[in-house]
Image (spheres, grey):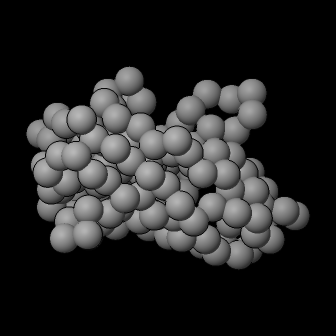
Amino acid sequence: QVQLVESGGGLVQAGGSVKLSCAASGRAFGTLVMGWFRQAPGKEREIVAAIRRSSVVKYYADFVKGRFTISRDNAKNTVYLQMNSLKPEDTGTYYCAACTRDWVLSRKAEEYDYWGQGTQVTVSS
């Protein structure tokens, strides 16, 4: 079992920045692929970014490339999402997720085994 707890969401103006954190417990964090997803009201959950355990291999959705950065600190069992140049369309609930199949960089929500409770990010125009 893996427990994930997100923090760092809130209200920010367009063009601003927010850094999300996700603390993991319950299983060797270094063996997990970690992802950030988001879901806006009335829309499906979509991947934002993902990172393999070595931090060398990362994935970003096209709509966040150049603006968001995913990183992890295996010593602190934490994954981060630095979000810059935020837009109103970035508004949504952001979820941290963990995948135990560490040989691929999963991009689909159904491939992730554990989820956090989510943290709200609201970007005002």
Q: Nearer the viewer, residue 25 or 68?
A: 25
Residue occupying the point 76% across, 64% down? 11
Q: Quadrant of the N terminus?
A: top left
Q: Is residue 19 above or below residue 27?
A: below
Residue occupying the point 38% across, 24% down? 110
Residue occupying the point 32% across, 63% down? 78
Residue 22 as seen in the image, left or right of residue 118: left
Q: Quadrant of residue 83?
A: bottom right
State the image coordinates of residue 115 (x, y, percent, origin top left). 41, 37
Residue 50 as seen in the image, left or right of residue 30: right
Q: Nearer the viewer, residue 36 or 60?
A: 36
Residue 5 as seen in the image, left or right of residue 58: right
Residue lying furthest top: 110
State the image coordinates of residue 25 (x, y, percent, origin top left). 27, 51
State the image coordinates of residue 39 (x, y, percent, origin top left). 62, 38
Q: Quadrant of the C terminus?
A: bottom right
Q: Is residue 66 visible?
A: no
Q: Is residue 9 visible?
A: yes
Residue occupying the point 41% across, 65% down? 80
Query: Count the marks: how many?
Result: 0
State the image coordinates of residue 24 (x, y, percent, origin top left). 31, 53
